[in-house]
Image (cartoon, grey):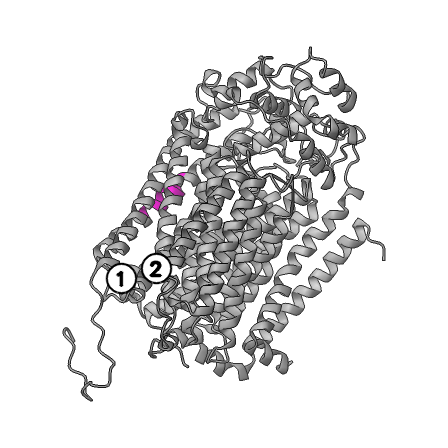
Amino acid sequence: MFKFHYRLERSALGLVGFIILVASIGGFIEIAPLFTIDETVEEAQDMRVYTPLEVAGRNIFIREGCYACHSQMIRTLRDEVDRYGPYSLAVESQYDHPQLWGSKRTGPDLARLGNKYSDAWHTTHLNNPRDLVPQSKMPAYRWLLRDQLRTDDLGQHLATLRTVGVPYTDDQIANATQDAYGQANPDSPEAGGVAERYGDATNIRPFDGQTDKLTDMDALVAYLQVLGNLTNAAHETQTAEVE
Amino acid sequence: MVFDHDSVVAFSKSFGLIYLVVLSLICLAWTYWPSNKKGFDEAARMPVLEEEDRPWR
Amino acid sequence: MFSDFSRDERTFAFIILGGLVVAGLAMAIAGRGDILGTHGWMVFGLSLIALFGAIRQADRPEPSPERLLEYYDAPTRVGLVLTLIWGVIGMAAGFWVAALLAWPDMTFDVAWLSWGRLRPIHTSGVIFGFGGNALIATSFHVLQRTTRARLPDALSPWFVLLGYNLFCIIAASGYLMGLTQSKEYAEPEWYADIWLVVVWVVYFAIYMRTLARRKEPHIYVANWYYMAFILVVAILHIVNNLAVPVSFGSAKSYSLFAGVQDAMTQWWYGHNAVAFFLTAGFLGMMYYYLPKRANRPIFSYRMSIISFWGITFMYMWAGSHHLHYTALPHWVQTLGMAFSVVLLVPSWASAGNALLTLNGAWHKVRDDAVLRFMALAAIFYGITTFEGSFMAIRAVNSLSHYTDWTIGHVHAGALGWVAMITFGSLYSLVPSMFKRERIYSNTLVEVHFWLALAGTVIYVFAMWNSGVIQGLMWRTYDESGTLTYSFLDSLEAMHPYYIVRAFGGLLFLLGALTALFNVIMTIRMPAKVQPDTGMDLPAEPALQAGE
């Protein structure tokens, strides 16, 4: 015992090893069990993956830092359920690399935003929030309607997401670029494949109201409209207790 | 041993507690061991020693 | 800088700079049309300029062996100035984003001026730019003084300091272009993260190599804290940033973790970034500069060791208190809460230790604004850790989470503790580092102190008020059992507080500008007249003027 103390005090490497030992175990004990959590978490048979356009929209959501003011995690508290809808389940963000649970609500929670407002409302609101909500503190994202969406690398994005665990098929990866276009252009020949590959529940609409070009706005609105709608699990299992 | 959720959680909860107690005891024993006092008192004076502001060799 | 390098070190410097030029060019080519390409050109340009500068100085004479009889403080000097520059940048960005919340139309239809892109400039600017440079600069100073050994070489400290600032520049410019991993306080993308790991390994090596040549067998406790900061930040950084890039030509990557695992990993990182970056490192600073300035040894050295192991051990479990009432399993939340509450013990032991050190020297605290900065930092450290433990209790957290209360709490710690201990240490270090008699103006230090204190108090009180009001409005029901207030009602109620908060931040920013001015003027003062240490001195040194 003494020998150990003696060495620790004098050897820099001993101190280093002890710090690492002491510091790493706490995190390990908390985090490691979570990787077996899928055994106990709700199963959601109907869980869908994001379409390429929604992935692009999610990346714009991240790019503009929306997560810093909008959470996507409804807590198990009565007022939150009354205000926003059924509380969030772990399964709902199982394909979110990374999660966007957020830490602050300068604006309202977005976990159940999908299909709550019309596409036109979102487009107008994102373009200048104060056109619709005079008291809003949100920036006006006017460039979203101007900027052409980059779609040429969406196949690579889907392939990368598959590497980290999202079950995209080869077919979905190969057609990512044209599916992104098709989802925002329902009358185009590309639109047919989207529902075929991603299911009939997929929103296929001209999200930003202009069909002549695919904009960042299309992608972001497509993403916002799918929030909370990837699975119905939360609505079905919500007989559980609310604190 | 099967690595299902329950057993991993059980291990975390039990081992974590033992680990916590043992480490605390080691740290407390070492810090307050009487023969270590002198060294600590010397160390505490390190920032306030009026020494030459240059390396020792 | 280059004239301090030996022949070998110059060769290594050329290899490193040449390697960076090539790496920058490779990034620029692989990532053309992408932000990665822009960053490639930046790395290429910066390292090319540095390479030309190095070539011009390559034939300077080698430094004399006598340099080894002195400590190597040049990187500390540059680090101190960089600390203040990043501080002003980060705090100015903070003031601006605060103002944007009161007057959101100041985005002016410019993407990089929007709130979401400027906010990480503020957070990274103050945490990594201001805090990180302060830690690097002071750690080099403390390490040498407490081991009585010179840094092992001249090249590696410069590599750490400049490499770290390159990371900061890549990070900040990326945010403006919309590049972020969206993980709070871990926003930089994969290539910046890899670069930081390289820098960090060298930083750690400097520590180990200097300690290996120390005089005293005992390692002074301040170094323990600095080492915990270096080691644990490395673990946190590597684990939380595990990600797969879309391609080697793309700046974008996808996190290896998803959903609940990612949330827990992120807040394990996020909370311990506070613990080991903003607490352990700055406690190291406090345990050296506060006793030094007060000219009294730390009240209880043993207590500082107990606090050290307590903090190192327990902080790691506390991260899950960021995820109360979420989809994270209940037992993990409870564990996080329990450890957060127990954490109060080592935290208050540290704060108490600092204040008890000042017992008997309160007249110095009264007269010396520099020491007052440090004393106030210890007080704010005590307040903030108490508040933190309190907010980690589930029932309290149900009210405080997602509101401005959290922002108030963070700033009580960041402005009151981190920035104050930094300014205190910096003011006490600058004159001796630049070999000046004194700081340029003690009055300005005094002005800075009151600006900083007023700014912090105004800021924190505004956010406490707005956060509690916000939290209560969200959960108020009327008699019929429906929610009384819409979200918009709560947003409108925040408006006056957002203006007050921006004003508090402005005061703090003005204080930082005062510090920058004061330090620049100190550097421009004439050097202290050094008594000649040559052989032709009389045996009795003549009386110095003013003695």
**Where residue A232 appears, x then y in whole percent?**
74, 26
Task: Locate residue A104, reporting x and y percent.
Answer: 53, 37
Residue designated by label 2: C426
Outermost residue, top side: A187
Q: Which residues are magenta?
A: C453-462
Residue C366: assigned label: 1
Does any portion of residue A78 appear in the rendered image? yes
Name the residue type under label 1: Arg
Subunit under mark 1: C
Which one is earlier in the sequence, the residue at label 2 or at label 1?
A: 1
Q: Quadrant of the N terminus of chain C?
A: bottom left
Type of residue at label 2? Leu
Depth-wise, is mark 2 or mark 1 nearer the camera?
2
Element on which disc 1 rests: helix
Classed neighbour count for the residue bearing mark 1: other residues with Cα under 10 Å, few (<14), some (14–19), many (≥20): few
Give percent across and percent down for residue A238.
73, 30
What chain does mark 2 sit on? Answer: C
A175 over A1 or under it: above or below: above
Residue C461 among those drawn in magenta: yes
Location of residue C73 (image quadrant) = bottom left
Q: How many marks?
A: 2
Q: Is residue C280 left or right of residue A91?
A: left
Q: Secondary structure at mark 2?
A: helix
Q: Quadrant of residue A120?
A: top right
Residue at 19%, 84% (x, y): give it: C541
Cα gap from disc 2 to disc 1, whole angstroms: 19 Å
